[in-house]
Amino acid sequence: MRPFEIGVALPVMQFGSDRKTAYWADLRAMVRLLESMGVDTIWVQDEIVWFADDAEPQGAWDGVSIVAAVAATTSSVKVGSWVLSALHRNPAIIANTVVTLDEISGGRFTFGLGAGHVWPGQAHAAGLPTDAIYSRFDEALRIIMPLLRDGRADFEGRFHAARELPQVPRGPRPGAIPILIGGNGPRGQRAAVEHADIWSGWIEEDAGVAEMLPRLESLEALLGEAGRDPASIGRAVGVPVNPLEPAGVEAATISGEPAQIADALRAFREVGCTQVDIMIAPGSVEAVEALAPVVEMLRAD
């Protein structure tokens, strides 16, 4: 049986209506706190800029740069991309980036990957493709996976190509870097069933387990169709958590006293999730400090 793991996503995106920014000095302090708490993984999102109606754009630090900085700053905690966007980068460069990050971390990197998304406006603004997102993702996987697993890729597609391309150097874990694929819908789940060690979904509207249940059922059905052992893939859920707010302030965010938050997170374990990844709010050192008793309670189980 897989252990129930606890991850925390660093607040690399601006937050709040006034678009506050967590600068590296604060992010580094959060990283040190999280490692001392004993969380399993520190995750870093991969976004460019979000546009919303009647609000200032919401920007983000570069995800790859922050993952590398976190890896170099820590010594024991796992570090992961949550999730690297296949839409933003060439697949061969993605594979080389992954191997490099695993080298920097000393073999502590978890490679989270997703198709990427055009919402809300970042793809258009950055000049990225806005069509055939999953067809592009499927082709990218035909290059990334052979490079990481076998050290070589040879593929000619409509959107991507790798022509007798070697992955050199191979890094500290050739063929063995853990791979997480994120996606709430069936196309992302199918990609995870075919390629990943962990599937990851995330809360969109209701921070209780009810929103995750149909996604977990869909994953089970796809595993059955593929003939894959259900025990061979982890099930992760990304959950917004605000430990500085009273309970029930926002439906999509878990908040309240530490015991209330811990109970709400345990509920995901009880329905079959093997990992909960906390999207901390607000993006402050104080919020991370307030998370410490929650992690301690979960670790005591």
Image (cartoon, rainbow, N blue to C red):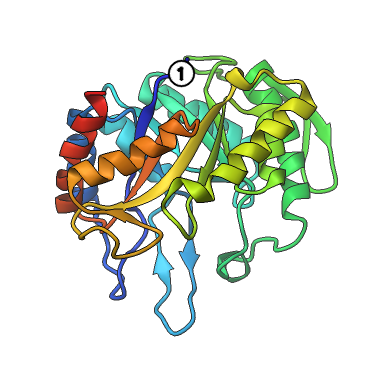
Task: Tell me residue 100's x, y (percent).
Answer: 47, 28
The spot of residue 105 in percent (x, y) is 37, 25
Q: Judging from the image, what secondary structure is the residue with disc 1 in?
A: loop
- Residue 232 lies, in percent from the top left, at 60, 18
- Kindly identify the amino acid type of the residue bearing the numbered disc 1: Arg
Asked if residue 204 lies left or right of residue 119, the reply is left
The image quadrant where one finds the C terminus is top left
Residue sitting nearer the eye, 44 or 222: 222
Please tell me in which quadrant of the rendered image residue 249 appears.
bottom left
**Residue 29 falls in which quadrant of the image?**
top left
Res 226 quadrant in image:
top right
**Closer-to-camera residue (91/80):** 80
Residue 162 coordinates in the image, percent (x, y): 76, 34
- Left or right, 174 with respect to 13, comes to right
Front residue of 227 and 165: 227
Q: Compared with residue 202, is residue 77 higher up or lower down, i.e. above or below?
A: above
Please report the residue visible at 45 percent of the width from the left and 25 percent of the height from the top: 102
Q: Residue at x 67, y 28 (%)?
A: 195
Q: Residue furthest bottom?
A: 54
Is 287 situated left or right of 10 in this image?
left
Q: Residue at x 43, y 31 (%)?
A: 270
Looking at the image, can residue 67 be seen? no
Query: Which residue shows up at 31% across the image and 36% down it?
Result: 70
- Structural crowding at the residue carrying mark 1, measured as other residues with C-alpha within 10 Å and reported as few (<14), some (14–19) or many (≥20): few
User: Where is 74 relative to 239, above or below?
Assistant: above
Total label count? 1
In the displayed structure, would residue 36 be above or below residue 200?
A: above
Asked whether the viewer can see residue 276, the reply is yes
Horizontal arrangement in the rendering, residue 48 relative to residue 3 (left or right): right
Q: Which residue is mark 1?
A: 2
